[in-house]
Every structure is written in structure tokens, then in C-alpha cells.
Image: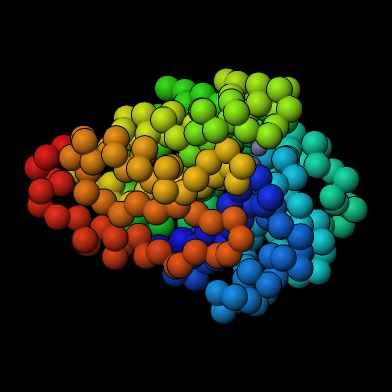
Amino acid sequence: MKVCCLGSGSAGNALLIEVEGTRVLLDAGFSARGLESRLASVGLLPSAIDAILITHDHRDHTRGVGVFTRRHGTPVYLTERTLYACQKLFRGGERTMHYGAARPFLLGGLRVEPFITVHDAADPVGVVLVDVTTGARIGIATDLGTPTAAMHHALSGCDFLILEANHDEVMLRVGPYPWSVKARIASSHGHLSNHAAGRLAATLLHPRLAGVLLAHLSVECNDPDLARDVVGGTLEKAGWRGWLDVARQDVPGPFLDVEELRSRIGPDQLTLL
Ligand SMILES: [Zn+2]
Ligand SMILES: [Zn+2]
């Protein structure tokens, strides 16, 4: 199971997940042309994408979905309320498929386990994606104001986590946004700070957690090194020795092989936790 972040942040989000025989785009928050060029930069044609899975209606997750699906015929999976909230992007002839939170479904070789998140969108979800052949699990939760018990339950036991580390609390407070935007970001329906991401990641620690990718960083109110230090420091203190990195907004990251990261887990981590 491989994952590649094509870009993440408030200017656009798209993740590529690949298992034997199936490639899925999770969110399509760049223009169709932007998505095509990011796919080209990792060596893929748009026709290589089997499905687009949308987590919520915000523009930074849906911007290019309509044009992309009309151009390439890619089926789009989203909840009914999310489709209603971003219906302007669609003209009616597209292949849109509905799914429901807490109702797992199969997409080729992937099992999609959607769960409800707390965020100021019409019907926001996070997802766990499971490789049905190897059993590898990737948990993805960005755009959430408050981690809930149901979210913890859904994300437990993942081999790889992609979690939001949106802002540093101080940088947000003194940053350039108007007060109303700052209040929205920091609210229980907004975005997670670095410290909140560290606390969430620490509660999800288990001996076989192989990697964590921090995503949806604010360009104005965060710094990749700071996010890495805060979350990485919290996890290291708990004995975790896995792979940690920060997703970029401007360029795609590397293809990460989850099974390969799993094989790197040392005996110290298995005994320390
Ligand atoms: Zn977002
Ligand atoms: Zn959002």
C-alpha cells in the first residue's frame, strides 16, 4: 500500500493512495489542471485514477473535482449532503456515488471506513483506508476542530496516520488573519493546533504504528520544523521511533510504502510502548 501527498494546506488538498490494482484520489482541492500536473510529476496520467473520494465540501478539498471527472470520467464518491453543498461544481451527468459515514464500502482493493469528524462543513468525514490484501491501514484525519471518542476508535490500530497539524497557537494569535477567521480556526469546529495534533497522535500510539505524516499546515500560522518538533517530541517521549514528516502545499511528496515502513519498526518500539 502506497500513499503520496500531492499537496496539503488551505490552498488545496489531494492524496493519492495506491494498492494492487486500485488508485484513489482522496480529495481534489486543486484545479483540474493542477491535479493533472501534480499527477504527471509523480508519473501518472489522469486515466490511472480509479476513483475520487471527497471528505467534505470545502473548496480546498473539492476545487477541481467537477472539471476533472467531466474530463476523465472518474467516478466521485461523496456523501449526499456533501454533494448538495458543492453541487455548483457538478452539471448533472457525472458519475457521483453516495457513501455514508460509519458505513464501510469497497473500492477495488481498498476498504473505505468513513467516520464523522467535527468541522464547520456540511458533512465532514475522516477515513481509514485498508488494503484488503495485506491488511495495512492508513488513517486520515485533517480538518477537525475536536478529536472525538468515535474518531479515536476509528483511527486506532492504523499502520500509518495522516493528521492535521494546522497552526501554532501563538502564531495564530499574532498572525495576519482577521479576528473572525482566527476564532473560526481555533474553535471546536475549526482546525487542530500542533499541540492538539501531538496529543491526538499520542493517544493513537501503538507498537505497530510505522509512520505519521502531518498535513494541512497553515502557511501563515505554522512552520514545518515547529510542527515536526512539537508532534515528534510528544511521540518520542512516549517511546515511539517511527517515521515522521510534514506534507507540503506546493509540491507532491514522495511515494511512501506502508508495508516497507512497517518492516522498519525496531524491537525497541515494540517493547517500549
Ligand atoms: Zn481543508
Ligand atoms: Zn475544511
Could you tell whether 136 is left or right of 170 in the image?
left
Q: Residue furthest front?
A: 174
Front residue (pair 126, 130): 126
- Compared to residue 212, the image places residue 51 above or below, namely below
Q: Is residue 211 left or right of residue 73?
A: left
The front one of 205 and 233 is 233
Residue that appears at 51% across and 28% down: 169
Q: The N terminus appears in which quarter of the rendering?
A: bottom left
Residue at image coords 56%, 45%: 216
Q: Quadrant of ligand 1?
A: top right
**What residue is drawn where x is 41% and y is 30%?**
195
Tell me the quadrant of the picture where the C terminus can be found.
top left
Judged left or right of residue 233, residue 225 is right
Which x, y percent locates residue 219?
Answer: 60, 46
Q: Where residue 29 sits in the image (x, y, percent)?
A: 69, 52
Please tell me in which quadrant of the rendered image residue 248 appears: bottom right
Can you see residue 150?
Answer: no
| Percent position of residue 243, x then y | 30, 54
Q: How many marks?
A: 0
State which quadrant residue 79 falls in.
Answer: top right
Front-most of residues 65 and 133:
65
Residue 102 image position (x, y, % from top left): 53, 33
